[in-house]
């Protein structure tokens, strides 16, 4: 029941940002979702340059831009702030570590009780690791 409620709550957000498409391994399928994902994807080269992200962070930054993260989080001036989600531009300054980032992405409420962030475990370990590398490389060096 809880899962159904979460899906009912997140479906309007997710459908508009490409979250379900990213979970399936692709991009947003709706025209509105595809347009929003495309706008966010245009920021990737700027993010890599402005934030001096290393090459190993590129798969994670691309996933961040297409998996719906920016529906709630901002990064280097782009994205949203739904549910009061934090800006992640300098999350790497906290030195939380890749293992922590993966655990948090898999089950946010397990790591941060009361978190409204949905679990992203269905992305699989490879993609979670890519996101974690990107987040840890994000130092806000602007």
Image (cartoon, helix red, strand yellow):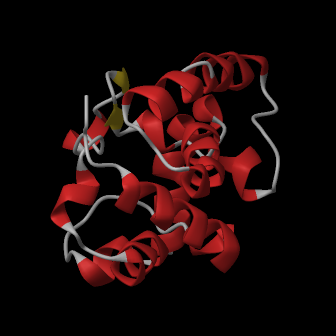
Place of residue 87 in the rendered image (x, y in percent of width and height, measured from the top left): 25, 40
Q: Is 8 in front, or is 122?
A: 122
Decide if residue 53 is on the left or right side of residue 139. Answer: right
Above or below, 138 against 140 in this view is: below
Place of residue 7 in the rendered image (x, y in percent of width and height, measured from the top left): 55, 57
Task: Give me the residue at 20% from left, 70% from top.
Answer: 114
Place of residue 112 in the rendered image (x, y in percent of width and height, measured from the top left): 21, 75
Place of residue 12 in the rendered image (x, y in percent of width and height, measured from the top left): 55, 36
Above or below, 142 against 87 in this view is: above
* Residue 44 lies in quadrant: top right
Above or below, 63 against 12 in this view is: below
Which quadrant of the rendered structure holds the C terminus?
top left
Task: Give me the residue at 58% from left, 75% from top.
Answer: 121
Task: Give me the residue at 19% from left, 41% from top.
Answer: 84
Q: Is 124 in front, or is 61?
A: 61
Q: Is 123 in front, or is 137?
A: 137
Decide if residue 61 is on the left or right side of residue 35. Answer: left
* Residue 107 lies in quadrant: bottom left
Above or below, 61 against 17 in this view is: below
Q: How many marks?
A: 0
Decide if residue 58 is on the left or right side of residue 99. Answer: right
Decide if residue 38 is on the left or right side of residue 25. Answer: left
């Amino acid at each position: 029941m809880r899962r159904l409620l979460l899906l009912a709550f997140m479906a309007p957000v997710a459908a508009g940002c490409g979250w379900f498409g990213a979970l399936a391994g692709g991009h947003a399928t709706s025209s509105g979702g595809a347009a929003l994902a495309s706008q966010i994807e245009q920021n990737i080269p700027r993010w890599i340059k402005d934030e001096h992200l290393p090459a190993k962070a590129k798969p994670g930054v691309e996933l961040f831009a297409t998996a719906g993260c920016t529906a709630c989080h901002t990064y280097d001036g782009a994205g949203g702030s739904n549910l009061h989600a934090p800006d992640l531009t300098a999350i790497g300054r906290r030195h939380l570590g890749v293992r922590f980032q993966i655990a948090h992405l898999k089950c946010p409420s397990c790591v941060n009780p009361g978190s409204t962030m949905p679990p992203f475990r269905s992305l699989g370990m490879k993609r979670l690791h890519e996101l974690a590398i990107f987040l840890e490389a994000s130092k806000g060096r602007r």
